[in-house]
Amino acid sequence: MRTHLRVVPLAAIALTATAAVALGGNVKLTPVKGATYSGVVHDETITVKVAKNGKTATVSLPGAPGFCQGGSGPEKQSSKAAAISKGGGLTATISYSSAIGSDHKAFATVTVKGNFYTFAGSQPVFQGTVKSSFVAAGSKSCDGQESFEATKG
């Protein structure tokens, strides 16, 4: 049932973007160079920092969202700048490892996919999805995805 509820916002995002393009191209499909976009995913702040040249962006999310009950321990995130396509698309990956002791063991990967938009007369946004994948046996029930919108700050 959760998957069905997440499909509706994704469909709304797609329809909004399609409608904006159909209404005469009053939408810019590239990010604002050097800008930081912020939003909320699973009660955590996600940031998308665009490079000054507008060709890459780095995504940061404090913890890997778990779509199950239970807590989490200290986490260390690792990500690299990802290329932004000419059409404003971005796919970035964040790896998470335990931050206990000196031995960091990978336990989750989060993939962020989305597009940059600036609709005429509105705040620039990044609309996307976050998909969590957990490594440990028995933790697959915590995998999931959520759509979000981050606005230029």
Image (tube, grey):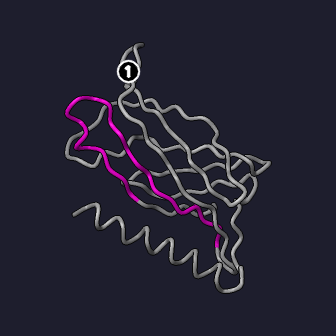
The residue shown at (56%, 48%) is 91
Specify the segment rendered in magenta: 123-146
Would you say residue 103 sits in the magenta stretch?
A: no
**Above or below — where is 48 with respect to 110?**
below
Q: Quadrant of the C terminus?
A: bottom right
Q: Looking at the picture, does residue 105 appear above or below residue 8? A: above
How many numbered markers are drawn? Answer: 1
| Along the viewing direction, whichever of 72 and 83 lies nearer the viewer | 83
Q: Amino acid at mark 1?
A: Lys
Please give the name of the residue rendered at 75% of the width and 51% of the height, measured from the top-left corner.
54
Q: Residue at x 43, y 67 (%)?
A: 10
Q: Is residue 127 magenta?
A: yes
Q: Residues within 10 Å of mark 1 (few under 14, many from 20)?
A: few
Among all residues in the image, which is located at the extreme right? 53
Residue at screen point 76% across, 55% down: 33
- Residue at disc 1, secondary structure: loop
Residue identified by numbered label 1: 105
- The quadrant in which residue 86 appears is bottom right
Q: Nearer the viewer, residue 4 or 149?
A: 4
Q: Is residue 50 left or right of residue 145?
A: right
Determine whether 104 is above or below 63 in the image: above
Return the x and y of residue 76 as percentages of the image width and height.
45, 29
Residue 90, given in percent of the width and then of the height, sits at 60, 52
In the image: residue 13, left or right of residue 22:
left
Closest to the observer, 150 or 94: 94
Rendering coords of residue 35 (x, y %): 70, 55
For this orientation, the residue located farthest to the top is 102
Quarter occupied by the N terminus: bottom left
Q: Position of residue 17 (x, y in %)?
A: 58, 74
